[in-house]
């Protein structure tokens, strides 16, 4: 069902997006093409990006079905922190004080949640 909803959302929002931002998209497309990438390569990259994001969302919904919503949210937060840290290491991205503070708060929050969850007994199913 998620795939059908995604396709319907894409088809209904595409005309609006093209109307609102078509000229911007065309300018960005032209700039990418002028940088040396071919239209086929750019189209393929955009398609792979879209499919990857769809699959990410599909897996996220499966995970949400399998775990508690709070656990899912914590995992999603940790994922974001890990991606930030990986970008710092892999690409040499500089962390601003705000991003360092945010990552620290997220890590401490997840740690505190893990400790609290371990101390609270699970409720038995009725």
Image: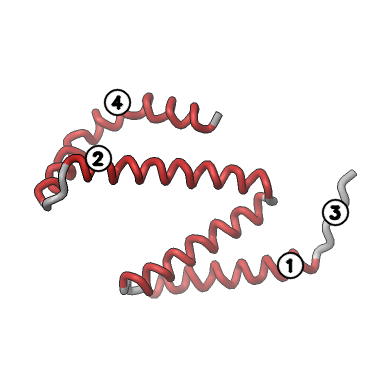
**Which residue is drawn at the image coordinates 60% and 68% (left, top)?**
109
If you read the primary sequence from the N terminus, does the residue marked by circle 1 or circle 3 appear first? 1
**Which residue is drawn at the image coordinates 81% and 64% (left, top)?**
120
Percent position of residue 88, x then y: 37, 72
| Quarter of the image where the N terminus is located | top right
Percent position of residue 4, x then y: 49, 27
CB-based contact (under 8 Å), mark 2 and mark 4? no
> Eyeballing the image, is 98 above or below 19?
below
Q: For mark 3, what is the residue? A: 123
Q: For mark 2, what is the residue? A: 43
Give the number of the mark in front: 2 or 4: 2
**Which residue is drawn at the image coordinates 11% and 51% (left, top)?**
36
Look at the numbered disc 4 and give the secondary structure of its residue: helix
Q: For mark 1, what is the residue? A: 116
> Eyeballing the image, is 16 above or below 40?
above
If you read the primary sequence from the N terminus, does the residue marked by circle 4 or circle 1 appear first? 4
How much space separates mark 2 and mark 3, taking CA atoms?
51 Å
How much space separates mark 3 and mark 4, taking CA atoms?
49 Å
Give the number of the mark in front: 2 or 3: 2
- Residue most extreme to the left: 34
> Eyeballing the image, is 13 above or below 47?
above
- Residue most extreme to the right: 126
């Amino acid at each position: 069902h998620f795939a059908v909803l995604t396709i319907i959302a894409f088809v209904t929002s595409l005309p609006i997006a093209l109307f609102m931002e078509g000229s911007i998209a065309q300018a960005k497309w032209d700039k990418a093409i002028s940088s040396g990438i071919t239209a086929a390569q750019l189209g393929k990259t955009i398609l792979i990006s879209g499919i990857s994001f769809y699959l990410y969302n599909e897996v996220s919904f499966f995970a949400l079905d399998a775990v508690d919503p709070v656990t899912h949210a914590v995992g999603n937060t940790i994922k974001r922190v890990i991606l930030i840290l990986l970008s710092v290491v892999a690409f040499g991205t500089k962390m601003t004080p705000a991003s360092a503070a945010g990552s620290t708060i997220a890590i401490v929050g997840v740690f505190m949640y893990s400790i609290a969850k371990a101390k609270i007994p699970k409720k038995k199913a009725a």
